[in-house]
Image (cartoon, rainbow, N blue to C red):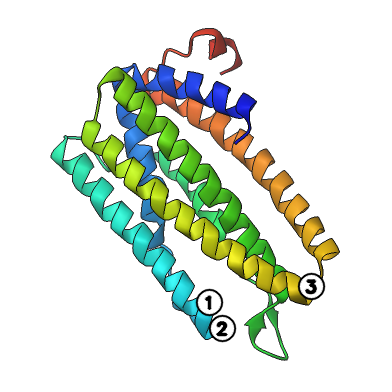
């Protein structure tokens, strides 16, 4: 996250956590982003990965499931409904699709995902885990600033450390596939993933803010005219 994005993100998150309804919706939505691993069936994917990659993916999903359990427990203990509205469900399902979209194309000769697909997948994981780490720390800091949800803040800080580990393993596999594909092709794939991520991220963020305004009474201030 560059300095400009960080500044804008801090202003937005700060405004959200200062308002009870939008703050509660944000906490629930963080839970939804982790919960997707409980809905995603990785068993059909595993046979098409190397043994090393199977272990890494299973470990990653184990971590995310632990995050989801901890956040679900927090929501229930603090009276936050974990049920999603129709708009929330539609929005979070768009987020769920991000990881799955890269694991589709098999090489008929090997019954494995093609090296280019795997590099794109790990580039996506690397970028998303980096964003998650930055976002979790930012939300934690803003919650601490307003003195709200201290336990949730501690959870986010712990999860951010896990996201860094996930980012590291993705980088390791990216290096492995770079040796097969070459740096030039990998740079092109990374550039495509970055463009796709920025485009989808901006749209997702805009739709999330609109949802906060329409369903949770978010007083957006100067942004209201755009929502």
Q: Nearer the viewer, residue 226 or 61?
A: 61
Measured from the top left, where is residue 91 in percent x and y?
Answer: 49, 41
Q: Tell which circle, 3 or 2, labels the residue nearer the N-terminal end.
A: 2
Residue 100 visible in the picture: no
Q: Cα distance, mark 1 to mark 3?
A: 18 Å
Q: Are marks 1 and 3 in contact (CB under 8 Å)?
A: no
Residue ID at (60%, 62%) = 171
- How crowded pointer 3 is (Cα within 10 Å; few <14, some 14-19, many 20+) is rated as some
Q: Residue tagged by mark 2?
A: 50
Image spot of residue 132 (x, y percent): 48, 44
Q: Locate residue 198 relative to residue 83 in the image: left or right.
A: right
Q: Secondary structure at mark 3?
A: helix
Q: How far apart are the alpha carbons under marks 1 and 2?
A: 5 Å
Task: Say which residue label 3 marks.
Answer: 181
The label number, if any, that marks residue 159 in the structure image: none
Does the residue at mark 3 contact the one at mark 2 (Cβ under 8 Å)?
Answer: no
Spatial separation of the CA atoms under disc 3 and disc 2: 17 Å
Instruction: List the residue tagged with mark 1.
Output: 53
- The one nearer the camera, 117 or 162, is 162
The furthest residue to the left: 77
Q: In the visual, does 216 lie left or right of 147?
A: right
Label 1 with label 2: CB-CB less than 8 Å: yes
Mark 2, secondary structure of its residue: loop
User: Looking at the rendering, in which quadrant would you find the C terminus?
Assistant: top right
Identify whether 46 is placed above or below 13.
below
Quarter of the picture containing the N terminus is top right
């Amino acid at each position: 996250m560059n300095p400009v994005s960080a500044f804008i993100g801090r202003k937005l998150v700060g405004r959200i956590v200062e308002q009870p309804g939008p703050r509660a919706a944000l906490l629930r939505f963080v839970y939804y982003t982790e919960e997707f691993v409980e809905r995603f069936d990785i068993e059909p994917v595993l046979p098409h990965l190397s043994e090393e990659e199977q272990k890494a993916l299973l470990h990653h999903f184990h971590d995310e499931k632990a995050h989801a359990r901890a956040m679900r427990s927090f929501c229930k203990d603090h009276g936050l409904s974990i049920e999603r509205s129709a708009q929330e469900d539609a929005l979070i399902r768009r987020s769920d699709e991000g990881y799955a979209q890269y694991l589709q194309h098999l090489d008929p000769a090997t019954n494995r995902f093609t090296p280019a697909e795997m590099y794109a997948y790990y580039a996506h994981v690397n970028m998303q885990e980096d964003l998650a780490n930055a976002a979790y720390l930012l939300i934690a800091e803003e919650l601490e600033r307003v003195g709200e949800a201290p336990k949730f803040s501690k959870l986010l800080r712990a999860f951010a450390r896990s996201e860094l580990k996930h980012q590291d393993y993705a980088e390791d596999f990216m290096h492995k596939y770079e040796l097969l594909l070459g740096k030039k092709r990998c740079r092109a794939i990374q550039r495509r993933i970055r463009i796709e991520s920025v485009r989808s991220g901006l749209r997702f963020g805009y739709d999330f803010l609109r949802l906060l305004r329409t369903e949770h009474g978010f007083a957006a201030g100067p942004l209201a005219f755009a929502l």
